[in-house]
Amino acid sequence: MAIRIDIKELYEIFEATPSEQNIMLVGTHGIGKSRIVEDYFTNKGMKVTALFLGQMSDPGDLIGLPRLNEETGKTDFMPPYWFPTDGEPIVLFLDELNRARPEMLQTVMDLVLNRKLAGRRLPEGSRIISAVNDGEEYQVGELDPALVSRFNIYNLVPTVKDWIKWATSAGLDERVITFIKNKPSMLDSRFDATANSLDKSPDRRAWERVARAIEGVREISTARAKMIAGIVGVKAAAAFMESQKEKSVTGKDVLKSFDKIQAKLEELSIENFPMLNDDILGTLNTLESVAKFTPSMQRNLTSYIKWLQDTNRREAYAYFIKAFLNEAPVRVQNILAKTLPSMLIEFTTFIQEIEA
C-alpha cells in the first residue's frame, strides 16, 4: 500500500524529487489531483501538459503519426500535438493511467523508462507525473509491475483544511466554504456499492461547481436547489439548504448597516455566527483595495465586534478572531492592520489571555 500524504507533504516531495524520477499519485476521483499538479508547477514557471489516457484509443495519440521521410526513404513519426518542440522542459501529467488500454500502456513504458517516444526525447529537466483512481467504483485495469516499478508512488489524501485553504484563495462562495467547515464529512463521500450508479454524491470538484453556480445569488430558489442536488446529490444538497435557512443576515449587511440589522442578530442562534463571521471575512476579501474599506464599514465592523462582547457571545467572538488570524487571506489581515490597528491589538490580547 502506498504511503499516505497530504498536499503540503506533496509539495515538499515535488521539491525534493529529481526531475528524472517519475511520480504516481493514487487517490479517489474529485480530489483535484490534476489541479494540484497544474497549480504547483505553473507557479514554478513550467508548462503542464495533461494527457487523459483513459480517453485515448490509439498509440498514435501519444507517439504521433507515421510518415515517409523523403530524404532517408524511411518511416518516421510526426511529433504529436502535445510534444514540446521548443526545447523547454515540461511536466507531462498522465491522468487515468490505470484506465488506459494495454496498447497505450506499452507506449507509456518506453516514455517513463527512457523519456523517449519514437526516438524523440523529452527536453532535459522534464518531469513525468501520473495519476490513478483508486476504489471499487472505478472500472480500472491492473498495471504491469514493471511499469509500476518506474514510479515513486504516493496515496494523496488532501485534508479538509487543504480544500478550505484552496477554496478561500480561489474566491469560492463563502456559503459553501462555511458549510464544509461546519460539516467536513460532506466534502467527500464514501463509495456505496448498493447505490444506483447514477446516484450523485459530493466531492471536492462538485462543491466547486456548486459555489460557482450560486455565486452572486443571495436567495437560492427551489429550482437552483434542485440544480445543487444534481451536482452533489440529494442528501448533501438537503444538508446545504438546511444550513442556509436560518441565515437571514449576511456579512455585507453587517458591514453596510449594522444598526439596521442588529435586531436580526439578536434572533440568530449561536450556531449561525461561524457562518456569518466567515461571510464578513469573505466580503472583506472581495474589496479591491484598502480604500474600499470605507470609514462607514470600519465603524460597522467595530460595532459588530463590540456587540459580540457586550452581549456575551464569547464563542462567536473567539471564532471571529481565530478565523481572522488563522484562516483569513493575507490581504484581509492587511486591510484591518492598516485601518483598525487597535482591533488587531485587541484580538492578540484576547488570544494571549485564553492561552495563558
Image (cartoon, rainbow, N blue to C red):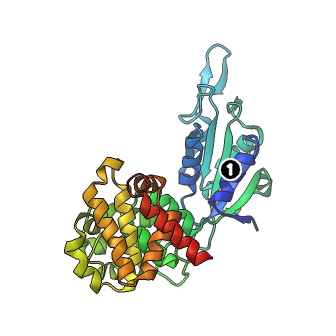
Q: Quadrant of the N terminus?
A: bottom right
The amino acid type of the residue labelled 1 equals Leu
**Quadrant position of residue 26:** bottom right
> Which residue corresponds to the image point at 64% horizontal and 33% vertical from the top-left?
89
Closer-to-camera residue (290/35): 290
The residue carrying mark 1 is: 105
Across and down, in percent, residue 112 comes to 73, 44
Across and down, in percent, residue 82 comes to 55, 36
**Quadrant position of residue 92:** top right
**Quadrant position of residue 206:** bottom left
Compared to residue 41, the image places residue 123 above or below, namely above
> Which residue corresponds to the image point at 45% horizontal and 52% vertical from the top-left?
334
SS at mark 1 in the image:
helix
Closer-to-camera residue (135/171): 171
Judge left or right: residue 272 versus residue 108. Answer: left
Compared to residue 184, the image places residue 111 above or below, namely above
Label 1 Cα crowd, 10 Å radius (few <14 / some 14-19 / many 20+): some
Across and down, in percent, residue 66 comes to 60, 30
Closer-to-camera residue (341/47): 341
Q: Quadrant of the C terminus?
A: bottom right
Compared to residue 115, the image places residue 137 above or below, namely below
Judge left or right: residue 62 versus residue 180. Answer: right
